[in-house]
Each structure stands twice: as structure tokens, then as C-alpha cells.
Image (cartoon, rainbow, N blue to C red):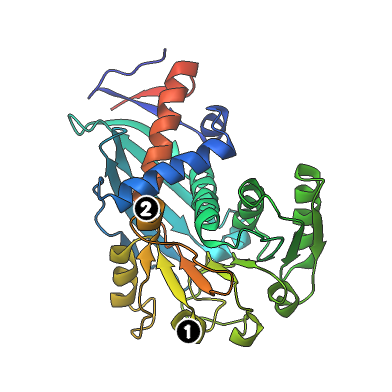
């Protein structure tokens, strides 16, 4: 097993190392379920994220977290700069630092982009297992980027009656590439591209929007398109959704009240807020009900929590050491 001398050396893992650690999508879902339950049972430490906004429509977030049961302790430093394509760079980037909870010493630094995509989709999958209709057979996705891909890789794993996936993107070729990828992964599903957001929304029992997070929202989903019984899942906060949809759903579920209130106080969400039915972890832990009938319109806003990242990162660190992945660097 690869080891680094505590306090004098640190393990460095590239994105390739992170992937080669070998965690499966199903294992990510179970880790997300465990972490959300820990949050619902208040068995964690996680101050609200701090943020920098150096460019319009960009963000840089610090996301610390500690889950005592797993010994997962650390912080993610995550960035999203949508115009990075102009520099031939990815939109999302970041690092996770894993710390020893007994000494506080850093033990590992790893790329966070793969972790962010996977754990976000894992949380969506757990959400859907509690909040989507059991007969969900048609879902729609707006935004065919990296996060859109991950959402569609995970959702079929928890929706046993799924038959049709609809995809749209402002760049039709992106939607077509994603369609082909998902068809190859899930050949039993009918995966189709649509031209308009309305076609995506109407008839879908679950809708995911995975576009960029805008400083000034530009809603592309009209409230009247959303049918009774729909689960609405914005990955891009309120960028694509009318705020009256947030205010008018039957249940509004969030991942973290602290994170939600932080974004409201920072002016990143409107001051008039919907009544919160529950934090997602409270539902996963069994303290609050999820979906209770097939006519409820439910909106689930998961802003993202550092504990989700550090739990996955700790598992990757343990597996990387066992497989002797990465590079030991001096501190």
C-alpha cells in the first residue's frame, strides 16, 4: 500500500488517478445516500460555503465538510467559469484536500472535477428515488454538457419504469452526441432530441435543467408547461425556471437550509422564498415524508454540500493508496 509520512508528505492524485480508483456510479449513489442521511441526522460538520465572483456568471466556492462516521474530513475548492471555452479550458475545475481528522494534517490533494460531476448526479438519483413518481417513464433534460451527461448516466439506475429520455441543448450537435452516448449505455431506452424546452417539459414526469448558473436568470421553462406530478430538478439554481414555479409547487425540498439561506442573503436567489418542506437528508433519514401522491408538483433544489465531496474523496484516497495510485510529494 502506498503511504506518505504524515505531516511531511502528501499524496497527489490526478483526474486519471481519481477515475482509476474504481468507484462505480452505483457506489456513488450509495455514498450520496449515506451522506444525505448523515446530514438529516445532524451527524456532520459543514459551515456554509464562502464564495468569490471574479467574473460575471462565474463562481469560486470553498466547501469544507466533516462526517465523523467515515472519518471524511477536508475541503473542496471549486470553480465554474462558463467562458473558459474561449481559452480552450473546461468550464468546471477544482481540487479537494483530504485531511486527517485526528491531527488536521493534509494527507491528499486530488482533482475535483470528476468527483463534482459524479456526486452531483448521485444526489439527483437519491432525490429521484424519494421524490419522483414511482411510475416515472418519461424524463427531460435541458443542457447537454458534462453535468447533463452525468445526470442521464445516473437517473436510469433509480427509475425502473423509465422508457423515454428527451434532450435539448442550445447547440443541437451537443444534444445529439449525448443522445448517442446514452443510447449506447442504455440500449433499452428511447432517447430522443427535441428542439424546444416546451417539448422537453410537457409530458415529462421529471425535468432536469443543467445549463450555466446565470447572475441574472433567463427563464426558459414556463410554469404552465409543468404538469401535476412533475419533479423539477434545477442543477443551475433558478437560471432556467420562473421564480413563480419555486413559489407555487406543492413541496419545495432543498439539500441544505444553511446553504440556501446563504445564497438568498448573498443576493444569488430572490428574497421572497418558498416555504421549505424539508431538507433532502431529512427525507432520506426518514424524518420527513417525500412524495405522498402522484399529483404533487415538487421542486428539489440541491445547491451542493462539501460533505458530499469529502465522503467520496476519502473513499478515493483509501482506494488509491491500496492500488498505489498517485504521486507522493513533500510538504
Which numbered disc, 1 or 2, marks the residue closer to the eye?
A: 2
How far apart in space, not on screen, are marks 1 and 2 (Cα)? 25 Å
Can the viewer see residue 76 in this picture?
Answer: no
- Residue displayed at 48% across by 84% down: 248
Q: Secondary structure at mark 1?
A: helix
Expressed as whole percent of the image width and height from the top left, the position of residue 226 reads 63, 79
Q: Is residue 118 above or below residue 60?
A: above
Pick out the residue farthest to the front.
Answer: 293
Give the side of residue 59 with respect to residue 185, left or right. left
Give the side of residue 91 with respect to residue 169, left or right. left
- Residue displayed at 72% across by 80% down: 198
Pick out the residue farthest to the left.
Answer: 103
- Residue displayed at 54% across by 53% down: 129
Q: Which residue is mark 1?
A: 248
Residues 219 and 207: in front is 207
Q: Which residue is mark 2?
A: 286
Tags 1 and 2 in contact by the CB under 8 Å rule? no
Q: Please identify the quarter of the rendering in which residue 277 is found.
A: bottom left
Give the crowd class for mark 1: few <14, some 14-19, many >=20 residues within 10 Å: some
Give the crowd class for mark 2: few <14, some 14-19, many >=20 residues within 10 Å: few
Amino acid at each position: 500500500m502506498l503511504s506518505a509520512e504524515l505531516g511531511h508528505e502528501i499524496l497527489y492524485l490526478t483526474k486519471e488517478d481519481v477515475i482509476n480508483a474504481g468507484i462505480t456510479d452505483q457506489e456513488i449513489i450509495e455514498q450520496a445516500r449515506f451522506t444525505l442521511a448523515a446530514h438529516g441526522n445532524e451527524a456532520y460538520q459543514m459551515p456554509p460555503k464562502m464564495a468569490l465572483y471574479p467574473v460575471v456568471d462565474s463562481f469560486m466556492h470553498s466547501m469544507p465538510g466533516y462526517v465523523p462516521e467515515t472519518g471524511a474530513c477536508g475541503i473542496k475548492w471549486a470553480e465554474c467559469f462558463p467562458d473558459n471555452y474561449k481559452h480552450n479550458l473546461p468550464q468546471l475545475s477544482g481540487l479537494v484536500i483530504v485531511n486527517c481528522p485526528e491531527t488536521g494534517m493534509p494527507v491528499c490533494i486530488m482533482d475535483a472535477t470528476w468527483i463534482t460531476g459524479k456526486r452531483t448526479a448521485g444526489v439527483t438519483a437519491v432525490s429521484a428515488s424519494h421524490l419522483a413518481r414511482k411510475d416515472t417513464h418519461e424524463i427531460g433534460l435541458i443542457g447537454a454538457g458534462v453535468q447533463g451527461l452525468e445526470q442521464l448516466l445516473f437517473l436510469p439506475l433509480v427509475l425502473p419504469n423509465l422508457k423515454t429520455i428527451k434532450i435539448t441543448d442550445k447547440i443541437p450537435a451537443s444534444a445529439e452526441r449525448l443522445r448517442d452516448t446514452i443510447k449506447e449505455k442504455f440500449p433499452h431506452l428511447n432517447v430522443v432530441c427535441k428542439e424546444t424546452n416546451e417539448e422537453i417539459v410537457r409530458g415529462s414526469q421529471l425535468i432536469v435543467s443543467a445549463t450555466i448558473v446565470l447572475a441574472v436568470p433567463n427563464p426558459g421553462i414556463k410554469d404552465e408547461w409543468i404538469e401535476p406530478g412533475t419533479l423539477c430538478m434545477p442543477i443551475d439554481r433558478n437560471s432556467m425556471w420562473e421564480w413563480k414555479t419555486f413559489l407555487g409547487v406543492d413541496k419545495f425540498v432543498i439539500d441544505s437550509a444553511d446553504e440556501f439561506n446563504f445564497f438568498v442573503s448573498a443576493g444569488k436567489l430572490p428574497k421572497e422564498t418558498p416555504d421549505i418542506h424539508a431538507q433532502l437528508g431529512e427525507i432520506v433519514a426518514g424524518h420527513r415524508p417525500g412524495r405522498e401522491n402522484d399529483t404533487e408538483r415538487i421542486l428539489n433544489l440541491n445547491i451542493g454540500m462539501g460533505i458530499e465531496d469529502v465522503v467520496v474523496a476519502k473513499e478515493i484516497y483509501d482506494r488509491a493508496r491500496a492500488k498505489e495510485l498517485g504521486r507522493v510529494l513533500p510538504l
